[in-house]
Amino acid sequence: QLHPSQVTLTLQGPMASLKDLKPGDLKAGVDTRNLAPGRHRLKVQVTLPPEVRLLQVQPETLTARVAQAP
């Protein structure tokens, strides 16, 4: 479980590139592989098209809660 479940990205780039962006062009997430059970603060990782630059991610980190396997 991730908290918060959404982030806000502030982007910069050519107007034509920004105008034509689709939700699938932007990827924001955290790497939860190999985490032990418990709470973890993880940095948000963002993948963008090459002509678009990331100015800000709000929040920069998310809290991940990993449950112990039954």
Image (cartoon, rainbow, N blue to C red):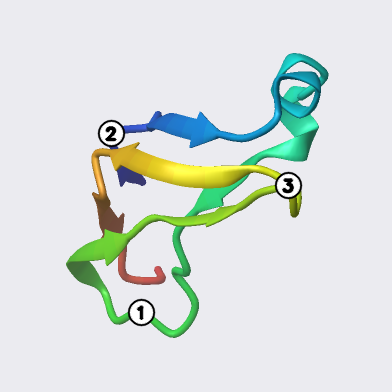
Tell me which residue sits at (70%, 30%) in the image. 14
Find out whether the residues at labels 1 and 2 contact each other: C-beta distance under 8 Å.
no
Question: Where's residue 40, x and y in %?
Answer: 20, 66
Percent of width and height locating residue 47: 63, 55
Q: Which mark is residue 51?
A: 3
- 65 vs 30, nearest the viewer: 30
Towards the viewer: 32 or 15: 15
Question: Where is residue 62 shown, x and y percent of the image?
Answer: 26, 49
Nearer the N terminus, badge 3 or badge 1? Answer: 1
Q: Residue at x 48, y 46 (%)?
A: 54
- The quarter of the picture where the C terminus appears is bottom left
Residue on which the image places disc 1: 35
Dot placed on the residue nearer the N-terminal end, 3 or 2: 2
Alpha carbon of mark 1 to alpha carbon of mark 2: how far?
18 Å
Residue type highlighted by circle 2: Pro
Give the x, y percent position of residue 21.
Answer: 76, 24
Q: Residue furthest toward the top?
A: 19
Mark 3–mark 1 distance (CA, rounded to whole Å): 33 Å
Residue at 66% x, 48% y is 48
Is residue 47 depicted above or below 38 in this figure?
A: above
Q: Secondary structure at mark 3?
A: loop
Residue 4 badge:
2
